[in-house]
Image: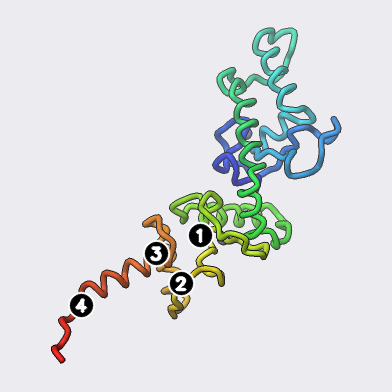
Amino acid sequence: MVLTAHRGLCVYCGRADSYSLDHEQPVSAEGHDIWWNFMPACKACNLWKNGRSSRIWVRDMDLHHRWPSVFPGRAMKPEVYAGISARVERTQREIQDPDRRDWFRHHYGTESKPRNKVELLRRLKSCAQDLKEYAQIPWKTPALEDYGRDVCTRRMCCGFRHDDSDFTLVFLNTDERDELERRARQEGLHAGDLLGKIARQYLARSKTPRKAA
Ligand SMILES: [Zn+2]
Ligand SMILES: [Zn+2]
C-alpha cells in the first residue's frame, strides 16, 4: 500500500524506485512504527535521512548548501530537497485515503510479509501491473451500497461479481472471462456493461421480421 504510493517512486529524491519503508518521524524520535508514519523511499535516501524527520533533514541539507564549511555533509540539489515537504504531504494524503486503504486491504490484506527483497520486488511489480490494467483507479469508482460484507464492491473492480449486481448469468471459461475483463477495463466499462453492449449489437443485427400469423 505504501510502496505503490507516489507512483512507486521514492518520495525524497522523487526519482528512484521505492522499495523500502522510511519512518517519516523516526522511531528514535518517538515516531510510530505504523503505516501512517511510513513513506515510500529508495534505500539510498532512507539511509541518508537516517534518524531524522524529513523536516529536519531538509533543514540540514539547506544549512549545508548555504554554509558548506560550517555544516559539512553530502549535498543534495536545492531544487530536489525543496520539493520534499510537498511530496511528503501529498503522499501522506494518498496513503491515508480510506478508499485506497480498503482496496489494498481487500486485495492484498491476507498476504504474508515478503520474506526477502526478491519476493518484495516481485510482488510490487505484479501489484503495479494489476493497477495498470484498470482504466480508472478502482478505489475511485462507485461501489455497491450497503453490501453488508467487508469485501471489495467497486463496480469497476469486483463489484459486478456480487449478489447485489443485477446481471444475467453468463458462463465463460477463465481465459475468456479474464480477456473480457481486460477489454472492458480498456474501454472504461465494467464487464457487465461490455456484455450488454455486445448483446444489444447482436440483437440489433439479428432482428428478423415477424411472420404474419
Ligand atoms: Zn530516493
Ligand atoms: Zn476489487
Q: In this view, does 77 lie to the left or right of 175?
A: right
Q: Name the residue under label 4.
A: 207
Residue drawn 70% across the image and 57% down it = 114
Q: In which quarter of the image is the C terminus?
A: bottom left
Q: How far apart are marks 1 and 3 (CA)?
A: 10 Å
Mark closer to the chain start, 2 or 4: 2
Mark closer to the chain start, 1 or 3: 1
User: Which structural element holds mark 3?
Assistant: helix
Asked if the residues shown at circle 3 and circle 2 are in contact, with their CB atoms under 8 angstroms apart, the answer is no
Question: x and y percent of residue 190 in the render?
Answer: 44, 61
Task: Characterize the local packing of mark 2: few (<14), some (14-19) or many (20 or more) Cα atoms within 10 angstroms.
Answer: some
Mark closer to the chain start, 2 or 1: 1
In the image, what residue type sits under mark 4? Answer: Lys
Mark number displayed over residue 167: 2
Asked if the residues shown at circle 4 and circle 1 are in contact, with their CB atoms under 8 angstroms apart, the answer is no
In the image, what residue type sits under mark 2? Answer: Phe
User: Which structural element holds mark 1?
Assistant: loop
Q: Distance between the residues labelled 4 and 1?
A: 31 Å
User: Residue 41's image quarter?
Assistant: top right
**Of marks 2 and 1, the one in the foreground:** 2
Q: Distance between the residues labelled 3 and 2?
A: 9 Å
| Viewer-nearest residue: 33 or 209 | 209
Disc 1 within 8 angstroms of ligand 2 (CB): no
Mark number displayed over residue 193: 3
Task: Look at the picture and state if 195 lies above or below 59.
Answer: below
User: Which structural element holds mark 2?
Assistant: loop
In the image, what residue type sits under mark 3? Answer: Asp
Q: Mark 1 points at which residue?
A: 155
Asked if the residues shown at circle 2 and circle 4 are in contact, with their CB atoms under 8 angstroms apart, the answer is no
Task: Look at the picture and state if 73 lies above or below 115.
Answer: above
Residue drawn 40% across the image and 55% down it = 188
Mark closer to the chain start, 3 or 2: 2
